[in-house]
Image (cartoon, helix red, strand yellow):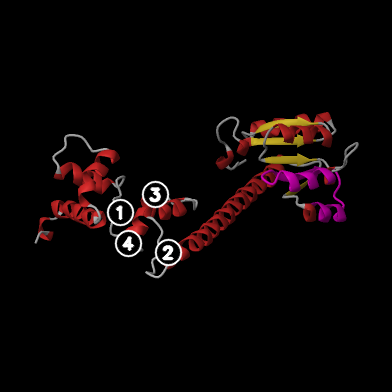
Amino acid sequence: MLVDDSYHRTPGDPGRRILVVDDDPRIRQLLLRILETSGFLGTAAADAAEARERLREQRYAAILIDVRMPGESGIDLLKHVTAECVDTAPVMVTASDDHHLVETAFETGAYGYVVKPFRMSELMINITSALHRRDLEMRNRDYIRELEEKVGRHRALHSTIAPLEAAEDPAAAPITTEEVIGRLTAVKGFGRWTAEMFLMFRLHRPDVLPVDDLGIVKAVQKLYRLRKRPTAKRILKIGDAWRPYRSVASWYLWQTLREAENPKLKT
């Protein structure tokens, strides 16, 4: 029998860990042996209460749930899993093949349904399919989360940039360079270097010296024939002589690097 190797990862990886919930000890042991033979790590629980405890202790890639158990039913446990353990793929393994029960299980969120007595191949097909669906849904959730973060950053950035650009109007109250940098770097994903580039190329501020820019560091080292790369503090000290046009000086520094790489650029 072929088993999907994409879930055979390092020991302890949630992608290989499966929880078996069944009140029959013989079925639990059978399922655990099948899982171990197929390269998964199985953990057993005799009822829903024990299963909840196991789920609180660690993460599982999948859970095999018997429907009819003493106490809380498998359907009730399934509701808990789909609500609280969204990264765990639930598969029902039960002796009941009642049509209405099957519908209820899938409507509640089951990824698979296996009727006892089952064949090993049937069980593994359901588990593999459930894990593939889990993987796709996790990727989709990650994509949506990332998209929401990007949209949030875009909105935050727009609401930050708009007043900064408006403040460049001669009639508006001026905002200092450091204040602009402070406002921009408060936006997630917006660092000091990016803020300095914004000041130079979007707001056209004439007195910006991006001391952490690698090109500026290399150009200053070469121009002043320094044995070691200069620190930000030293570049600031050297750059004091270029005030209030340090942006212009930075452009010339970058140009010296481009000319060194391509002598045809020299005029």
Q: At label 1, which amino acid type do we have?
A: Val
Position of 22 compared to 178: left or right?
right
198 in relation to 226, above or below: below
Find out whether the residues at labels 4 and 2 contact each other: C-beta distance under 8 Å: no
Q: What residue is disc 4 on?
A: 201
**The C terminus lies in which quarter of the figure?**
bottom left
Closer to us: mark 1 or mark 3?
1
Q: At label 3, which amino acid type do we have?
A: Arg
Does label 4 or label 2 sit earlier along the sequence? 2
Measure the C-alpha gap from mark 4 to mark 2: 21 Å
Q: Name the quadrant containing residue 76.
A: top right
Q: What residue is disc 3 on?
A: 192
- Give the residue at x 25% y 39%: 234
The image position of residue 65, as x and y in percent, is 79, 41
Does label 1 or label 4 sit earlier along the sequence? 4
Q: At label 4, which amino acid type do we have?
A: Phe
132 in relation to 69, above or below: below
**Secondary structure beneath label 2:** loop
Residue 213 can be seen, yes or no:
yes
Q: Which mark is residue 208?
A: 1
Does label 4 or label 3 sit earlier along the sequence? 3
Does label 3 or label 2 sit earlier along the sequence? 2
Measure the C-alpha gap from mark 1 to mark 4: 10 Å
Position of 205 compared to 93: left or right?
left
Decide whether residue 174 is among the magenta residues: no
Closer to us: mark 1 or mark 4?
1
Q: Which mark is residue 173?
A: 2
**Secondary structure beneath label 3:** helix
Closer to us: mark 4 or mark 2?
2
**The N terminus lies in which quarter of the figure?**
top right
Q: Which residues are magenta?
A: 76-105
